Image: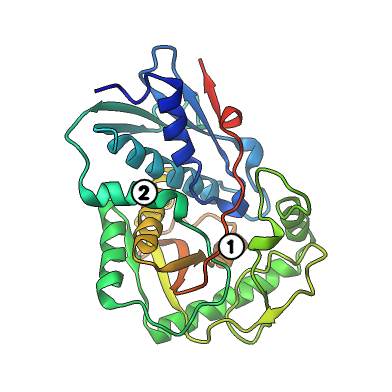
Amino acid sequence: MLHPFATRVGVRRLVTAAIAAPSVHNTQPWLFRLDEDASVLELHADLDRRLPVIDPRGRALHLSCGAALFNLRVAIRVTGHRPVVEPFPDAAREPALLASVRAVDATMPSPVQSELYATIPHRRTNRQPFGKRRVPQVVRDELMAAAREEGVALSLPGPQTTAYLLGIIAAADANLAADPAYLDELARWTPDRARGDGIPWYAFGPRPTGRGLPVRDFGLAGPLAGREADDFAAHPQLGVLLTRGDGPQDWLRAGQALQRVLLTAARRGVSASPMTQLLDARGDATTDPRPHGHIQSVIRFGYGPLVPGTPRRPFPEVLERV
């Protein structure tokens, strides 16, 4: 069977799948490098795309790249090969080198693996209001199992914990909205013209009224601040992604878990969007032990309308060959 790195067409298919991953503010902070023997495909962080205001430690950058790494793994798997991933292979000399990936012969993929791959181009971050329909328990169990597959916990909190989370998210969102540096950074990634990255106007969703769910308002920094408003759901269904540690290894692992969860949700027709303002506003290191783990993402689940995808950087811009 032809090796997936053997041809430019094969590599393009893999990288195209990888870059369909979600990323913070759609910054797409990744670069791929194929070695001269076409035996190793490296994933590098594009540090020029880091967000210094909301992501000073690079946590969100690593999660974004982890999501791309998961897509790459799935894309390799459906070729009849198994991805062999070495995270941070040379951390001392190349901290931006997040993973090296080889592909070795394996059996054909399982139906679930094939379905996850087929779902990659259809996954969307949905910033629209969701309906009242609850996600069934069988799907909730599947989402939690997806996170466990990657060594990460997904907690689906009850009403009291959800109310507490919404309170601190709302406070964090208000603090961010009052920060000029945050607004400047947001403006750079909410372009008013067509380009291959950032959050375009059509993906903003309605403006939150402040009476309901504290979703992030991507229109704060531009001319669409006065667009149609909505309360969003009063009783949202949240998921909280938790890791034992809170360093780069944990962040990269959490990003892979996040993408497995999002693809699993999309397979079941469940909409999802992040609500991570509390992490963006925190900014400080949290290396102290926590009994339930470190929060890496808060996700809103539900059933929303179909939404368009956001743009992606062109393939030649994200791949280089040694």
| Circle 1 Cα neighbour tier, 10 Å, few/some/many (<14 / 14–19 / ≥20) | few
Tell me the number on the disc at residue 118. 2
Q: Nearer the viewer, residue 274 or 4?
A: 4
Measured along the vertical axis of the image, is residue 278 above or below residue 104?
below
Residue 247: image x %, image y %?
44, 47
Residue type pointed to by label 1 = Arg
Residue 130: image x %, image y %?
51, 77
Snapshot colouring? rainbow
Residue 217: image x %, image y %?
68, 69
Residue occupying image coordinates x 65% and y 48%: 51
Q: Left or right? Give the position of 285 relative to 177.
A: left
Determine whether the residue tagged by mark 1 lies in a helix, strand or loop: helix
Q: Nearer the viewer, residue 180 or 10?
A: 10
Residue occupying image coordinates x 69% and y 66%: 176
Q: What is the tally of numbered marks visible in this picture?
A: 2
Residue occupying image coordinates x 64% and y 55%: 54
The N terminus is located in which quarter?
Answer: top left
Residue 31 seen: yes
